[in-house]
Amino acid sequence: MSVIDSLLAFTFAATLLTLTPGLDTALILRTAAVEGHKQAFKAALGINTGCLIWGVMVAFGLGALIAVSELAYNILKYCGAAYLCWLGLNMLLHPRGSLATDNKMQTKAQNWFIKGMLGNVLNPKVGIFYVSFLPQFIPHGQPLIAWTFGLVMIHVVLGSCWSTVLISATRPLSSFLRKERVIRLMDRSTGMVFLLFATRLAISKR
């Protein structure tokens, strides 16, 4: 496979992966609808930062350790499941009824970058995906580290573009989406999604 063929094939595959609805999509849509596009972009930036962190770990061999070590995989898996469960329960049991107005709530809203990043970093399946998926698109004889970073950056750029589309799609409905009843429904629905993903991650196998 030539360099151009590898890049085109990976871009196509990564695009399909990016467009597939998942935890990241739910997080971005909920944040955009409830807290506005600025906070949603912070969440998207956190998600992409998590991808870059996994790219670094995979490039330098740490991702392979997660892939082959059952203990390392399980530790990260259960930490990730517990974190998602915590997020989900908070949204489900304590849904917001309005936008943040005081300093305490604004500070809480600004944590979506951290939440987006940890959601990816604490998911070992992202690392295993990179370990098993990226090498297929690295041409023989090419530098492994440089190509790993390059492919991860393509994935990040695609993710950023898709996040922008999702966030922009909520703007025409912003007045409706920020009603008290809708905000509570969005929080509880997203909380349920997070709990489902936490359960799925906890019972998953490599």
Image (cartoon, rainbow, N blue to C red):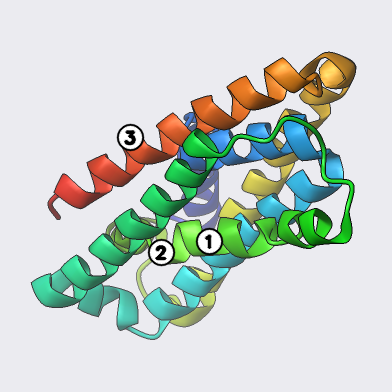
In the picture, measured across the screen, residue 68 lies left or right of residue 171, that is: left
In the picture, measured across the screen, residue 57 lies left or right of residue 37, that is: left
Query: Which residue bears the numbered disc 1?
Result: 151
Residue at 12% x, 75% y is 71
Q: Secondary structure at mark 2?
A: loop
Marks 2/1 in contact by CB < 8 Å: the verdict is: yes
**Image quadrant in which you'd find residue 125:** bottom left
Mark pair 2, 1: CA separation = 9 Å
Mark 3 belongs to which amino acid? Leu
**Image quadrant in which you'd find residue 81:** bottom left
Mark pair 3, 2: CA separation = 34 Å
Query: Which residue bears the numbered disc 2?
Result: 138
Q: Is residue 115 visible?
A: yes
Foreground residue among 31 and 61? 31
Q: Secondary structure at mark 3?
A: helix
Foreground residue among 82 and 89? 89
Residue at 56% x, 39% y is 94
Q: Earlier in the sequence, mark 3 or mark 2?
A: 2
